[in-house]
Structures are given as structure tokens and as C-alpha cells.
Amino acid sequence: MSEQEEFAGKMLSILNDGMLCLMVSIGHKTRLFDAMSAMPPATSAEIAMAARLNERYVREWLGAMVTGRIVDYDHPSGKYRLPPEQAACLTRAAGIDNLAVFTQYIALLGDVEDRIVNCFRKGGGVPYSAYPKFQELQAEETARVFDARLVGEILPLAPGLVSRLEQGIDVLDVGCGTGHAINLMAKAFPKSRFWGYDFSREATGIGRKEAKRMRLKNASFKAVDAAKMVDKERFDLVTAFDTIHDQARPDRVLKAINRALRKGGTFLMQDIAGSSNMHENIGAPLAPAIYTISTMHCMTVSLAYRGMGLGTAWGEQKAKEMLAEAGFGPVQVSQVDGDIFNYYYVTGRE
């Protein structure tokens, strides 16, 4: 096989896999995978009935799933089956291992494709307001990790932190989004006090409502531009979960976080796993996805506000450099099982 034929085969695979991403996203949103995982082999009519969906659409969707080798099909009986090995990566019951969640980004980013193309020609960026469902999707994505790992595995990455939280300290989450992480921590550590800051009033409102449902008295939320925080030596712990690289001016945000920490305080930052050097990301399983998300969301949103445009792939080396410039001390970098997207940086104010 010639190199041209080999690459043509790769392009066919890319085309098919890209289309399958849309179908997997639909399977997740309609809960078809969840329904099928709890069923014995069944016909399209039986699957549609179990999922309360239109049979004709379900049947066509199953065609993509079968030819894409995601669902098994028995021709004589006309029955379909979702193998348990596939269900372990596609259902809500899979928790942190549910990869179907990420396929939803394809349609979301596709909505702004023409605007991104225009940015290629004229520069500038696409503002955050152009992604109305992004926060909702990111909340669903991160909740999987937080529910499974936040209290038991992520917070313990900082030596002695859990003990201090149990005794009672002041905690800020910068770029808290819809506030799920804050509320989980507030529930787990009732003696500590928690604040969530986010640029979006809608997001902080959602966090406030969740805190009310959970009957939390130690969680508060406020709409704040992280780069303009005025808090000084107020917090013992500041967290930033997958938010720093999105900021227009992450340098100012990191310096503001440093000022907000008390002496001896801890900064726990979750951000995208990868190298700042592109050639070191070749072969990494998520590298193409990371650069795509960067081009079509993280980088362009920053540039829309005349920001630095760090992008999703700013990487470990740049992160450490900027943490040092902001005045933080030595940095410990870790990962947690099941979270293939992120590094966890633990540092502090000296």
C-alpha cells in the first residue's frame, strides 16, 4: 500500500469517526445507551419503547451504531445488543469512565465554525456569549470527576489539606461555574467556609440554588471578574478547576489569587494535561481534541476580549512559569485515576 492510499484510508476513518461522534452524542443525550445497557438483546421497537423515543429515528441511529461497531446486531432475530465492554465507556452508570459526554463538544463547536473561519481571515475572537450551552456541558463533564474524586483523591493531593478543611478554613473557588465543586466541599467539610466567584451571574445563580437544595449554610456565590479580585490575604485555600487558561488575562488572575491567599495558604489548580511544546504532544491520545477545543473555544474566547489567548494547550511548562511569575512557591504536579484530561498543580504563597 502506498503512502497516499494509507492516508486516504486514514481520512475515511476520520470522516466515519467524526460522524459517529454526533451519533454517540445523540445516544448520550437521549439516554439510549443507558436504556440498552439494562436490556437483553432487543428489536428497535423494543429499544424505542424502553427509551420513550421515536422508533424510526432509533432504527436509523442503530444503523450507525452497528456499522460503527459499537452495537452488536443479530440479523436472523433482528435484535440489537450493547456489549457490557462498550457500556462501560458510554453510560451514565460508568460515572467518570463515561466518554460519551465528550462527544457533545462536536456539535457545540460546529455551531461557531463559520465565525472561527472568519477569525482565521481577520483575527479577533468569538465571545463567550456565542456558546450558550458550553457551561451546561462543562458542568456535566466536570461533575463526573468531582463526584468520583474531589473529596477522596483530589483534595488530598495537597499534604495536610483535608485535616485543615475538617478543622475549618476559608476557601475560594475561582471560576466556579455552576458551583458543584464548592457545594461538594461545603457538604464534606461543614466547619469550613466556602465562596465561589465566577464572571457569569447565571452560573453563580445555579450554584446558589444547588446549595439551597443541599441545605448548605457554609457556601456563598458571587459574580466577580477574577482578574479584578480585590481580596487580600483572605483565604487559606484557593482552587481553580479548568479555568485559568480560559481567562483573558491569566497572568492577572494568578497574581490576584496569590494576593487573596494568606501566608502559608494553598493554591490547587486543575488544568489541561499536556506539554507547552507541541512536538511533545505528538502521540498523546487527546492531543488533537485539545488543540481543536483550543482553536474553537478557549483561545478564541480569550482573544475576543483582547486577552493573551493562551489556549487549552498552554501546557505544564508555561503553567509553572506563570505560577512562578505570580509569586507562588514550588509546584507539585499530579494526576488522578480516571481523569485523563487534567493535571493538578499544588503550590502555595510563601
Image (cartoon, rainbow, N blue to C red):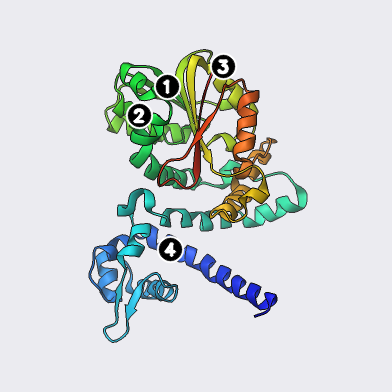
Say which element carries label 2. helix
Contact flag, marks 2 and 1 (Cβ < 8 Å)? yes
Q: Which residue is mark 2?
A: 185
Mark 4 vs 1, N-terminal side = 4
| Residue type, numbered disc 1 | Val
What separation in Å lies between label 2 and label 3 (alpha carbons)?
A: 23 Å
Q: Which residue is mark 4?
A: 24
The quadrant of the picture occupied by the N terminus is bottom right
What separation in Å lies between label 2 and label 1 (alpha carbons)?
A: 9 Å
Say which element carries label 3. helix
What separation in Å lies between label 4 and label 3 (alpha carbons)?
A: 44 Å
| Residue type, numbered disc 4 | Val
- In the displayed structure, 275 sits above or below 8; it is above
Q: Residues within 10 Å of mark 3 (few under 14, many from 20)?
A: many
| Residue type, numbered disc 2 | Met
Contact flag, marks 2 and 3 (Cβ < 8 Å)? no
Say which element carries label 1. strand
Mark 2 vs 4, N-terminal side = 4
Q: Which residue is mark 1?
A: 171
Q: Position of residue 93 (x, y in %)?
A: 30, 53
Q: Position of residue 249 (x, y in %)?
A: 64, 31
Of the numbered discs in the image, which one, if any, rests on residue 259? 3
In front here: 218 or 345? 345
| Residue type, numbered disc 3 | Arg
* Residue drawn at 64 percent across, 49 percent down: 280
Q: Position of residue 240 (x, y in %)?
A: 50, 31
